[in-house]
Image: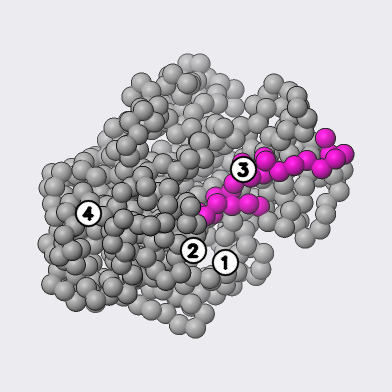
Amino acid sequence: MEPRPDLASIHDTGPATAVLGPCPPAFNAAAHVLAQAAGHPDKVALVLVSATGAERWSYGRLAAAVGGVATGLAARGLQPGDRVLMRLGNTPAFPVLFLACLTAGVIPVPTSAQLTVPEISRIDSLLRPKLIVAGAGIALPRDPVCPVLTDGDLTGWYDLSPLAPVLGPPDRPAYTVFTLGTTGTPRAVVHAHRAIWARGLMRGGWTDLGAADRLMHAGAFNWTYTLGTGLLDPWTAGAAALIPVEGTAPEALALLMKRHDVTILAAAPGVYRRLLRGAVPPLPRLRHGLSAGETLAEATRTAWEHATGTPLFEAYGLSECSTFISGAPARPAPPGAMGYPQPGRRVAVVDADGTPVPRGAAGTIAVDARDPGLMLGYLDAPEATAERFRAGWFLTGDMARMQADGSLTFLGRGDDMMNAGGYRVSPAEVEAALLAHPDISDAAAVEQRVKADACVIAAHYVAPRMIPDAELLDFLAGRLARYKQPRLFRRVDALPRRANGKLDRQALRSREVPDGDA
């Protein structure tokens, strides 16, 4: 659409309290998540599913284990505000420890089990934790200065008398997660207890979760997408959370969904693409799918809806604020858009000074600095925290256009935007066009240097055959302006991804260009 100078790119859906009511002044995030346990102790809360069976946890068992581990933490001398470094895999010990820390006022720090010794050592030196809890075979920091417990040690605490939740101001620190941000350097994002309360805005704005739902998340526990959407949100709603055991192939999810009467599937776009490679069986209980973690291609959304007869709703968020833009059953996103600001949010598209740009113009996605789901800041990094705020907005670093109706079209990370002959080009737009090709199952577009003074748009794609460049250019000609079309094509076996499953564009940009390709 053409920019509308008369209409600024700002969309205010009202205060969060109008949707959720006020957050209690004496609050504990774990108590909020497990509030359903007292009235429904025998209801299924967690199911770890596999091709050979399932492990089930009731709400009563989950709450008892959480309370017992909280008692164990306190007995070891941990005080509110102390940090616990979590090095756990896809086992029930992960959510039990996370919620137990919140119960005791201790700050859990979940980390990917795939991190190496050097990577986790850097995190350990920044955090200075008072305790590390680790699963077998998961890398530990070099020479940790605090005690290290195993996940087996935690099970000995499950039957202890439960510790009463430590109540306090909802703005006090609750948990910390790590993000690479725009710099590639890990930063510790500190969230308040109120961030869990603010997740309630997603229920009407994205997930449509209810107590009768059975939500399956395809990710690992230690991914914040899984932790929030796959565990905390279902439990807050009184629903069942289903998680495939570690090592389950995405192609096997459809049969598990059918076997366990899944009503909502949450996954990254790549999982949906892999599911669609095979025949998806009838899923009569499925209501809809949820997608986040990276951009959802319109072709994937359309193919999923055709294969299952159910809609697929995308959400945009980041470690600093979880999701706050999305499509939902109550308001599906228009074709090509990722969604609308959720009820209770105030969102804008701004310039470098934090001033909203005209609707239809490209700018940086920003969320109100007072949003209750927004982080408290980066740990021990006040300058880095301050850099992200302008004129009352938190700037995400991601680019978008806001349409006249308030929906947003994602254009890519600010540092991922490509330059073609002076024009800024969105990698998401190029990738969506590539993924429309029937043979391409995954694709990434980056700006790649081919000479000391020359860069081109390079397309990396996954396909069962080498597709001639002429065929690809002909295919893209009707979908992209000439300046947006890649000048370099590479077929790869797989795209490089980080531990959280997100595309590693820097790794693609750093690949050497073979002689003759320049």
Q: Label 4 crowding class (10 Å Cα cut-off): few <14, some 14-19, many 20+?
A: many
Q: Nearer the viewer, mark 4 or mark 3?
A: 4
For marks 4 and 1, the one nearer the N-term is 4
Residue 437 x, y percent position in the rendering? 74, 50
Q: Is residue 316 left or right of residue 197?
A: right
Q: Is residue 181 left or right of residue 493?
A: left
Whole-angstrom CA distance, mark 2 to mark 3, is 23 Å
Check the picture and name the quadrant holding the C terminus: top right
For marks 3 and 1, the one nearer the N-term is 1
User: Would residue 358 be counted in the magenta stretch?
Assistant: no
Type of the residue with mark 4: Val
Residue 185 x, y percent position in the rendering? 48, 40
Q: Are marks 1 and 2 in contact (CB under 8 Å)?
A: yes
Spot the residue most to the bottom.
52
Residue corresponding to mark 1:
250
Residue range (magenta): 495-518
Q: Nearer the viewer, mark 3 or mark 1?
A: 3
Which is more toward the observer, 453 or 314? 453
Helix, strand or loop under label 2:
loop
Residue 423 x, y percent position in the rendering? 68, 24
**x 33%, y 70%: residue:** 150
Q: Is residue 104 left or right of residue 200?
A: left
Residue corresponding to mark 3:
505
Whole-angstrom CA distance, mark 2 to mark 4, is 28 Å
Helix, strand or loop under label 4:
loop
User: Would residue 511 be counted in the magenta stretch?
Assistant: yes
Whole-angstrom CA distance, mark 4 to mark 1, is 35 Å
Q: Quadrant of residue 517?
A: top right
Which is more toward the observer, 288 or 118? 118
Q: Nearer the viewer, mark 2 or mark 4?
A: 4
For marks 4 and 3, the one nearer the N-term is 4
Type of the residue with mark 2: Ala
